[in-house]
Image (cartoon, rainbow, N blue to C red):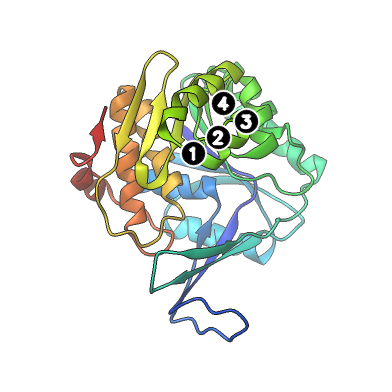
Amino acid sequence: MIYTITLNPSIDLQYLIQAFAFNEVLHAHVVRRDLGGKGFNVSHALSRLNIENVALGFVGGKTGEFLVEKLSERSLENDLIWISGESRTNTTIVQTVSTEHLKVNEPGPRISPLEQTDLLKKVEKRANEGDWFVLSGSLPPGVPINFYADLIRIIQSKGARAALDTSGAPLKLGIKSSPFLIKPNRIEMQELTGLSLDTPTKYPQAVTVAHEMGAKNMCLSLGEEGAIYSDGVKTWKATPPSIIERNPIAAGDALLAGLVAALSGGQSCDQALAWGVACGAAAASLEGTAFASIDEVDALLDQVSIT
């Protein structure tokens, strides 16, 4: 079974405007309210690939009710911890004259120690050998920065595999627990390794450092440049297909979903990388926080170049 863990989910509120203008009243031509949170995004992307999964995490308040309703509308199985606080809303403003956008994320509700313990116990109870757990996104207030590290130890002590997609101190501490897979973007990789990645020639050193820090496998997401995957022995570079980009916000979540879907299904690292990059490109070509069907991904797969 594949599980996703979303500690800080949200409503993703998107405004589509003509163009940015400061100190003026802007009018949205389109308003969208979608299920948000990186782990929920991975669950949604997996379901579009016909991959069974269960969403775990924290939800609360009226926003939490909206999130659970959206999970149900998408037939996404979930086993969530209800908290006393109100889940957050994240806002994106996209302009029609270019692909530039603004994104503002709320910090999220404070999670009590008891609520944290409830989730740790739930994960320990569910984890079995061969399962995958995708740990995605930021930590809400009240959650200690070593929480992902604790989750990874619990998960992998049961013979399951943990895939970590976060940033900053939670990533630096989490990688010390030797997760099976990490998926940083360029900025997150620079913060993790302390290396500048201003040119592609510097990527191999950063990959080596990440492995030395504890990552068993890693995928460096490079946006329009594609992605790099390393298993510690070999390294592959994927060049993505040419697309018309509409909303790249959740493309990284789609990439991770594709990787985990392929790896859990027994595909090789290079095949999984190609599948993940095709998923990310397909998601970026869609409006809003949306994910491609398996047929839409298949249509782009042959256009992904692997070296």
Query: Marks 1 and 2, how far apart in space?
Result: 6 Å
The Cα atoms of the two marked residues, 2 and 3, are separated by: 7 Å
In the picture, which quadrant includes the C terminus? Answer: top left
Residue at mark 1: 198
| Mark 1 neighbour density, 10 Å: few (under 14) some (14–19) many (20 or more) | few
Residue 297 on image: x %, y %: 26, 46
CA gap between label 2 and label 4 equals: 37 Å
Circles 1 and 2: CB distance less than 8 Å?
yes
* Residue labelled with disc 3: 194
Q: Nearer the viewer, mark 3 or mark 1?
A: 1
Whichever of labels 4 and 3 marks the residue nearer the N terminus, that label is 4
Query: What percent of the width, then of the height, locates residue 72?
Result: 48, 57
Secondary structure of the residue carrying tag 1 is: loop
Measured in 3D between alpha carbons, the distance from the residue under mark 3 to the one under mark 1, in whole angstroms, is 12 Å
Q: Position of residue 148 (x, y in %)?
A: 66, 32
Q: Give the class, few, some or many, for how many residues have Cα within 10 Å of label 2's Cα (few <14, many ≥20).
A: some
Per the image, label 4 sits on a secondary structure element best described as loop
Mark 1–mark 4 distance (CA, rounded to whole Å): 39 Å
Give the residue pinned by disc 2.
Answer: 196
Tag 3–tag 1 contact (CB < 8 Å):
no
Please tell me whether mark 1 or mark 4 is closer to you in this view. Answer: 1
Q: From where the camera sits, is residue 87 visible? A: yes
Residue type for callout 1: Asp
Disc on res. 127: 4
Q: Earlier in the sequence, mark 1 or mark 4?
A: 4
Count of all numbered marks drawn on residues in the image? 4
Q: Which part of the image, by quadrant, shows the N terminus?
A: top left
